[in-house]
Image (spheres, rainbow, N blue to C red):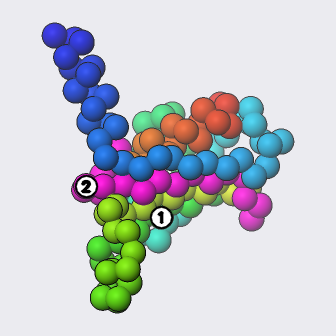
Amino acid sequence: MIKVFLLALVLFFIGCDGKISTNIHDKSKVGMRLASVEVVANDTFSKESVHAIMEKRGFLVAKSPYRLRAEHRNYKKACTNPLSKTSSDYSFDGLVVIELFYEERKIYTAFMDYKGEQKEALFEKLIDAMVDDLKMEQ
């Protein structure tokens, strides 16, 4: 029973989502201790999702020199040009992005195209990648 559940969980998270792309811009921050982080976003869904995920992971979300910027783009709403829609590959429904800054210097970027509904789990994948890549501690 547990094996079936785990397989279903893996298939749920793999789904049709795109590959996560990451970049560590400041390698001196690998292994850093993140006492607090401020979450900023261009939309309510992104801000609330990332805020909740960071708190679930045990990070203090508050005013900080570290700023985690989150962004969600809905391709279906963003592109209204019929010519672009017919000449481009619109196999994905949207894009999620996170960028970590320290005092206006970019430390890390992760982004991923996705298919399906927008959901908090999309940002969880990016945040987990960031925590692993940067070997972050609370």
Q: Residue at x 43, y 42 (%)?
A: 124
Left or right: where does residue 113 sit relative to residue 64?
left
Q: Which mark is residue 138?
A: none
The correct choice, above or below, for 42 with respect to 58 in the image is: below
Q: Residue at x 52, y 54 (%)?
A: 111
Residue 47 position, x and y percent, is: 43, 60
Which callout, 1 or 2, points to the residue nearer the camera? 2
Q: Earlier in the sequence, mark 1 or mark 2?
A: 1
Q: Can residue 50 be spotted in the picture?
A: no
Q: Amino acid at mark 1?
A: Glu
Q: In the rendered image, which residue does mark 1 sit on?
A: 71
Q: Residue at x 45, y 41 (%)?
A: 125
Instruction: Tell me how many marks there are.
Output: 2
Task: Please tell me whether mark 1 sits on a helix, a strand or a loop.
Answer: strand
The correct choice, above or below, for 108 with respect to 72 in the image is: above
Along the viewing direction, whichever of 48 and 111 lies nearer the viewer: 111
The correct choice, above or below, for 2 with respect to 67 in the image is: above
Provide the residue span drawn in magenta.
103-121
Q: In the rendered image, which residue does mark 2 sit on?
A: 116
Left or right: where does residue 19 sit relative to residue 27?
left
Q: Residue at x 31, y 46 (%)?
A: 16
